[in-house]
Image (cartoon, rainbow, N blue to C red):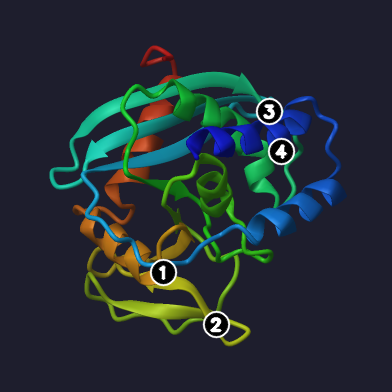
Amino acid sequence: MLVNKRQVFVSWCMPIIEDNLTPAEAITQQKELATRVELKPLDFQPKLIGGCDISYERFSSICFSTVVVLDYETMEVVASSSVQDEMTFPYIPGLLSYRELPSIMKCWEALALKPDVLACDGQGIAHPRGLGIASHFGVLAGIPTLGIAKSVLLGEFVEPDLKKGSYSPMGHKGKTVGYALRTKDKVKPVYISAGTSMTNEDAREIALHCARGYRIPEPTRQAHLLVNRLRRGEEPIG
């Protein structure tokens, strides 16, 4: 099954790498891939959780990407993979995954130790076409995913209480597309949505479990810290 998912990734992403895919074609593909998203209860307890992030060189197409793997209970980083790459797809709101995923997938393929679930810095189904970067990655890689976003792309909500663990559903057209979740007392919430192969409730519980004293839960926080050290030349690529 995983081989088939990787074959799908190659077939969809090679045009992006070759810079031949138009935004209109990307939107058409996005709509088709969104039909493959599965919102179903996560039926196992993760032992390892991954986080991914990407950092850009200013005024350049050069990027640095990383995937980190953490022990689900201790939040200790146990593995990581990183690349320096060049982005070929333009920045277009709503099509961020087409710009970032080719590089992130290279990190994923190079990981010797794969996590059970992956948290992405961005949206899951809380996206105009239901396919944020977490959903896109999960469909292609065949892994349960969730999106942890620092800003809202889609959905209306009531501000949750100020206490850690408080949350409010994010609604769009009568459906819950995610949750605004307070991960630390009196800090701005993060915006959680299922990517695929889990429910929004699963995603919220996982994100809260991974919140260890900071606004950003550990998987994407650790990925962010590492990728910026890489960009500054403080860590070797690999």
Q: Secondary structure at mark 3?
A: loop
Identify residue type, mark 2.
Lys
The residue singled out by tag 3 in the image is: 87
Nearer to us in this view, 85 or 62: 85
Marks 3 and 4, the one that precedes in the sequence: 4
Disc 1 to disc 3, how far (Cα)?
A: 30 Å
* Residue corresponding to mark 1: 200
**Callouts 3 and 4 close, C-beta under 8 Å:** no
Residue ID for mark 4:
12
Residue 231 seen in render: no
Q: Which numbered disc flags the more N-terminal residue, 1 or 3?
A: 3
Q: Is residue 151 above or below residue 105?
A: below
Q: Amino acid at mark 3?
A: Met
Please tell me whether mark 1 sits on a helix, a strand or a loop: helix
Residue 131: name its quadrant.
Answer: bottom right
- Name the outermost residue toward the front: 1
The residues bearing labels 4 and 2 have C-alpha atoms spaced at a distance of 29 Å
Task: Say which label, 4 or 2, has the lower sequence index.
Answer: 4
Residue 16 appears at what percent x and percent y?
75, 33
Foreground mark, 1 or 3, reads 1
Q: Quadrant of the C terminus?
A: top left
- The answer to whether mark 4 and mark 2 are in CB contact below 8 A is no
Mark 4 or mark 1: name the one nearer the start of the chain: 4
Q: Is residue 64 above or below residue 205?
A: above
Residue, disc 2: 175
Q: Looking at the image, is mark 1 or mark 2 earlier in the sequence?
A: 2
Residue at horizontal 44 percent and vertical 29 percent from the top: 66
Q: Residue at x 60, y 57 (%)?
A: 36
Residue 40, quarter of picture: bottom left
